[in-house]
Amino acid sequence: MLYEWMTGSQAGDALDEFLAERAPALQRLRSALSGLGRDADALLDGSPESVASVWEPITARCADLGTDPRSLEEDPTRPGWPSWARHGKLVDPHPPAESLALVDGFVSYLAEVITSAVPDALWIVGEHRISDYPTLNYPVLASDSHQIFLPALPLYSVYQSAHGRDPMGGPEMLAHVRRTITALRGEGPESSVAEEPLVTVVAEVDCFDVGLREDIAEQHPHLVERLVAELTDRDGVVSVYRYGPAALVVDVPEWDETRLRLWLTLWLQRHLPR
């Protein structure tokens, strides 16, 4: 069941399941790094700076693994996936089980690094006054000023790798972690706009009406142009029409509202200047 479809009770159970997976996933990451010829004890030193060095062999391995040739429905490994992958919105062609396990271990390591830097951050079920907020019902690390679903950007990057597109390198992943730590501390631009989603998506009869947060179009107009270009290049996208500074019409018959909102949100999280 997708997080978006869960009741409050089901989302609470999913959070418990996610947390129970953290320690075993980290241990599997240690073994995987050793199998890749890396010194796991030296790499996993718990510092924010170590994130870049840990991520590099993971993203390289995921690029080598590519995509699973089977569809999501036909993949027999799916019951053994991390809970966030089973309950999250994955699409075909999807990364294989080994890639998802590597991301899962990396998520556990990120959790250790970030909670060490922000001890007051708590694991909660994602909540928001907006009913279709991207992390609603997801297991998130949160403070009063920010909440984050840790697998999101690593998984996005693995999809990039698997499809031969530009993945996040070590320095970019480190920058993401530093921004997250800053936001969870209540500092920086991400915490100041925490109440407003980056994007809203409304399904119309034959298309989707997309609204970007107003400050994005005002402060980064060229980034919106780049977003339109990259979205237009995605498989299944027929057209993207920008009819206002912060307004798009997207014709993508093979996608649903959740998939489009997640793609746009993750793309913006990656590329917005901080």
Image (cartoon, rainbow, N blue to C red):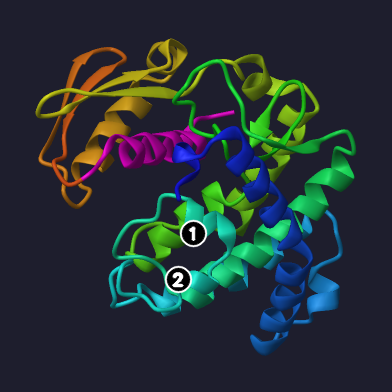
Give the residue displayed 49% in from the left and 71% down from the top.
79
**In the rendering, at what x and y percent does residue 4 appear?**
46, 38
Residue range in magenta is: 255-274
Element at badge 2?
Answer: helix
Splitting the image into 4 quarters, where does residue 245 fall? top left
For label 1, the crowd category at 10 Å Cα-Cα, with few meaning under 14, some 14 to 19 and many 20 or more, is some
Q: Where's residue 269, x and y in %? A: 51, 35
Closest to the observer, 50 or 115: 115
Amino acid bearing label 1: Arg
Q: Main secondary structure of the magenta part?
A: helix
Q: Is residue 273 inside the magenta stretch?
A: yes
Callout 2 environment at 10 Å: few (<14), some (14 to 19), or many (20+)?
some
Q: Is residue 77 above or below residue 200?
A: below
Label annotation for residue 86: 1
Left/right of residue 57 with respect to residue 158 in the rendered view: right
Residue at screen point 50% across, 17% down:
130
Q: Is residue 48 visible?
A: no
Q: Secondary structure at mark 1?
A: helix
The answer to if 165 sits in the magenta stretch is no
Q: How many marks?
A: 2
Query: Residue at position x 31%, y 34% from top?
Result: 227
268 to the left or right of 244: right
- Give x and y (percent) for residue 1: 45, 50
Toward which corner of the image does residue 66 lie, by quadrant?
bottom left
State if disc 1 and disc 2 touch (CB < 8 Å).
Answer: yes
Mark 2 belongs to which amino acid? Arg
Seen at 88% across and 47% down, the residue is 116
24 or 186, nearer to the observer: 24
From what the image shows, is residue 70 above or below residue 215? Answer: below
Q: Which residue is mark 2?
A: 78
Left/right of residue 128 with respect to residue 203 in the rendered view: right
